[in-house]
Amino acid sequence: MTAAQPLIALVGNPNAGKSALFNALTGARQKIANYPGVTVERKAGRMALADGRPAEIIDLPGSYSLNPTSPDEAVTRKVVMGEQEGERQPDLIILVIDATNMEQHLAFALEVLALGRPVVMALNMVDLAARDGLTIDPARLSAQLDIPVVETVAVRRRGLEELNTAISERLSASDATHQLPITPGAPMRERRRLAETIAREAIVGETTSRRLSQQADAILLHPIFGPLILLALLFVIFQAVFSWADPLMGLIESGAEALSGLVTATLPEGFFRDLITEGLIAGVGSVVVFLPQILILFLFILLMEASGYMARAAFIMDRLMALVGLSGRSFIPLLSSFACAIPGIMATRSISDSRDRLTTILIAPLMTCSARLPVYTVIIGAFIPNTSIATGVGLQGLVLFGLYLFGVVGAMLVAWVLRATVTRGAAGGFLMEMPKYQVPRLRDVLLGLWQRAWIFLRRAGTIIFAVTIGLWLLLSYPQKPVGSDISQVDYSAAGRIAGVIEPVVAPIGFSRDIALALIPAMAAREVAVAALATTYAVDAEDEDEQAVELGQQLAGRWSLPTALAFLAWFVFAPQCLSTIAVTRRETNSWRWPIFMLVYLFALAWIAAGITFWTASALGL
């Protein structure tokens, strides 16, 4: 291939349609290899220009910025700047823009245009823009940017002839420069503001629904009103978790009591009856009762996702995360961790910056996963009065909201410390596309709730069941001598194990029973509730005492400072062992899982201690 052949580079954001345009321009005349030294795909091909000359064209990896945060973006920058080994600087750049999301794509386009290189813009996917009710004037866009703009639909080969002509003319022009629309190196915020202005001028028509969507975004994404609306929505969610679930939880509790009574009346006294009533029903049943609350929480999450609001929440949180040294790429993994830290940690694979990814993995357990909800609920229900502090505002829901908020704030503070110490480095940039607002489909929401219910019940029927039965056996054996004044729990193997741990947690207000519950909670958070229920069932003197609800048992045995310290412990305490195992796999080292265990246990002990000592000093 001779040096006289022009070199053309296709540049744009991911999902702009560059590859489709590349295929349409080159046909079968293309080859694929890797760039020297990196595992980044290099797609190159040949095309015939409108004036008959051959040209070489390369499809560069999708990028959001010329300040790279990934190997793909680094290659794009090097090629555009003429710094890539074995690749000469392109003679012309084709900027591929998604017409349906012009505002966002123009932010990157302005950065490229500021280089002053010869450019032709392919305004791609204009058919989808028309479907969405957008009418764009390419002449206005061309006048604002001072470059040729051609409408294309790459997948249907529309506009290719006009694009080819514009490329040929630009390459043949004696002066192919353009006025710089923005100062080279301008910050992202300035480029985004200019992109919004240019897009607004170029759009000459839009449907009412799109206009309403933009008006909604102006409020929901407002730097002040947006976060306030998000906080208000979360506040409503946690109020609903208590108020809506209460009747359904009552039905499950009544069913468990009836089942326990039936088993007691049917089976003879002995090992199997105690196993079912004290181990299975008291233990597993005390966790299953919280299923309505978990489903209500996920109902709101599913509605937020399906309506398009969840992406807006991510955008709002990106501003907060930037303050602690993280980019918005960390938000989705952290959001997933509210369901379970395991998929959240696995989702960090999408974060290109290794320091961002490690920081996100280390703080993922601080997001309040659904497994904590039974723990929070039983303690709040036992110690926080079910009173209304304002119309529609219950004190219990307010406390639950505070615990979730406490976890998020704690995670952000830990991230800030980590980014200033062990994962020091600059945060990467972040751009995201906003989906259209839409009405959630009932079928999809119900399917999502069913899947969540099945996961919870399967967990209750496997991990929680096995751990609870194992704990019951340790609590029941060896059996205390007949007539002994020693309680069965103190005499049991489990009680003796808890006695070893109790001195460590006694200064923060934890009793032997709590120490006993913390051990199996490492298998699954919910097991802490099952462990307490099983412990008090084994320790009960008679069937009437055994039938007392766990909340009433706790209220009679624990002080308020102890209960508050227990809540503080579970805000920070390490996740289940599965989380530790996934962290080991994702970091390919035992160093970071051990670091995670140590710092989380230390935070949990300190937070619980401060809470207990402060509450005791205040005389609560």
Image (cartoon, grey):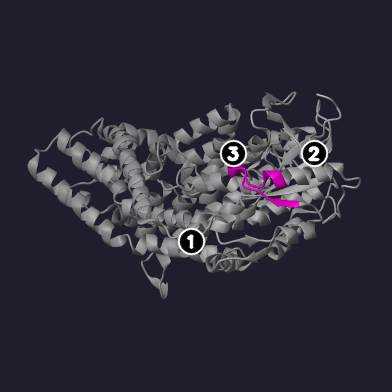
The quadrant the C terminus occupies is bottom left
Res 234 label: 1
Q: Residue at x 80, y 49 (%)?
A: 113
- Give the camera-side residue of 452 and 610: 452
Q: Is residue 411 left or right of residue 480?
A: right
In percent of the image, x 57 and y 39: which residue is there?
A: 348
Of tags 3 and 1, the one toward the viewer is: 3
| Amino acid tagged 3 | Ser
* Residue 403: image location, x then y, percent: 49, 56
| Residue 92, horizontal then vertical, whole percent | 81, 41
Tell which residue pokes out farthest to the front in this image: 52
Q: Which residue is mark 2?
A: 51
Mark 1 burial class by Cα count in 10 Å: few <14, some 14-19, many 20+: some
Give the amino acid at mark 1: Leu
Q: Is residue 256 left or right of residue 525?
A: left
Which image quarter: residue 117? top right
Task: Compare residues 430 and 397 and report the one nearer the observer.
Answer: 430
Residue 350: numbered disc: 3
Name the quadrant containing residue 558: bottom left
**What number is the disc on residue 32?**
none
Residue 263 vertical placement versus 480 (above, below): below
Foreground residue among 191 and 117: 117
Q: Is residue 601 magenta?
A: no
Residue 299: where, in percent of width, then height? 39, 55
Q: Which residues are magenta?
A: 149-162
Question: In this orientation, which residue lies closer to the viewer: 45 or 37?
Answer: 45
Q: Is residue 99 above or below residue 496?
A: below
Q: Amino acid at mark 2?
A: Asp
Q: CA distance from mark 1 to mark 2?
A: 61 Å
